Image (spheres, rainbow, N blue to C red):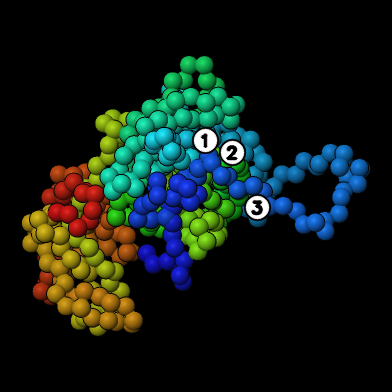
Amino acid sequence: MRGAGSGRRRPLAPPAALALLLITLVALAGCGSGNATPGPQEESSESSTPSTEARTSPAPEVAIETAASGFNAVRVFEEASPGVVTIRSIFGPESAAEGSGFVLNDEGEIVTNAHVVTDESSGTRKPAEEVFVEFPDHNVVEAEIVGFDPFADVALLKVEPAGLELHPLQLGDDATLKVGEPVAAIGSPFGEEQSLSVGVVSATDRSVKSLTQFQIIGAIQTDASINPGNSGGPLLDANARVLGINQQIETNSGANDGVGFAVPTTAIERSIEQLREKGTAEYAFIGVSTESLYPQLAKKLGLDTEFGGLIAEVIAGGPAEKAGLEGGNEKIVFQGEPYSVGGDVILAVDGKEVIESDDLARFVAEHEPGEKVELTILQGGKRKQVAVTLGKRPDTPGEG
């Protein structure tokens, strides 16, 4: 997905002193450092001093509501904030990072982003040497990294629950989420723990880069303010249920410019199930890169279809190549955009039509490595059925 203008979609990264610690290929939503936390903006020297009466009068209790009836941000915060934690990761004597997370259950499982507890500045992804979880009641305990999933940017931690008052958050359903629905984000932006921001879902089904070069499909876009340190914290619905974990922002400045992205609960649930069982997560891989076909481009190419995935490249040694699929052999520019043409077109996966740009990736992700799918393709102007045995997704798309 192309970004707007010159904006960069970036992880919420740490201050300059630790910037090299968590550099990734995407801009992730928010590891901050416990050091050099920016202070609040100072008031103007021209502001008047409030009267004694104004200072001592109790503030009215106001339920902050969005335009959507029934969304009470005060209630959402009161219900969810006891389950939101601050996570500090130690990578060495002078290397640390900070993010957010939330309590998953009474057994002491904590969910956060993988980039909060891993470091790939050396070119190899390494887990933190130590991880500490701070709860809202100021208990700080060491956590075990059960596992991390760089493809979904999800990590599962475990603390010893004895002696802790845990407040698990309930996972919601992102599948029925509508644009315009109110949401709240809670976390530790810039190290400021238990901070709340509110907004709406500004888009659904976005694709954003993970810690690998593959996309996270179905990401939630929000205008709720998300900043460095929010990484791993929950994005919540009106019932204080987790819709996703805040992961990255679209930015020109390095901080929130009004558009944030969260990993959806459907991806989180799939990830933590595997992490809990074996400490790693595996995804199916078909071994092609595609470009979205649309009516005008299809007409230009003389294709007997209006939609589909135009195969630009077939990865050498991958499942698609073994099944006889072919990639593009010619470059053209159409309506100002470059395309690799002349290859096969994937029309459907197991009978499900490929129409939207993320459909192929979504359909493949519904399967496990080693499973077979039946593709409907256009090859040489003719429709064919091709069986493909899916492989295991590598760290880099170009690897077969």
Q: Nearer the viewer, residue 28 or 284?
A: 28
Q: CA distance from mark 3 to mark 2?
A: 23 Å
| Image mark count | 3
Q: Are marks 3 and 2 in contact (CB under 8 Å)?
A: no
Residue at the image point whose x is 20% and y is 81% from the top: 302
- Check disc 3 and report the residue beneath it: 66
Q: CA distance from mark 2 to mark 1?
A: 7 Å
Image disc number at residue 86: 1
Q: Nearer the viewer, residue 369 or 89?
A: 89
Q: Position of residue 240 (x, y in %)?
A: 56, 39
Residue at the image point whose x is 65% and y is 39% from the top: 75
Instruction: Please tell me whether residue 156 is drawn above or below residue 347 in the rendered image.
Output: above
**Residue 370 lies in quadrant:** top left
- Check disc 2 and report the residue beneath it: 193
Lower sequence index among marks 3 and 1: 3
Specify whether residue 362 is in view. no
Q: Are marks 2 and 1 in contact (CB under 8 Å)?
A: yes
Looking at the rendered structure, the secondary structure element under dot 3 is loop
Q: Residues within 10 Å of mark 2 (few under 14, many from 20)?
A: many
| Amino acid of disc 1 | Thr
Q: Position of residue 2 (x, y in %)?
A: 39, 67
Q: Is residue 395 left or right of residue 73?
A: left
Q: Is residue 145 left or right of residue 281?
A: right
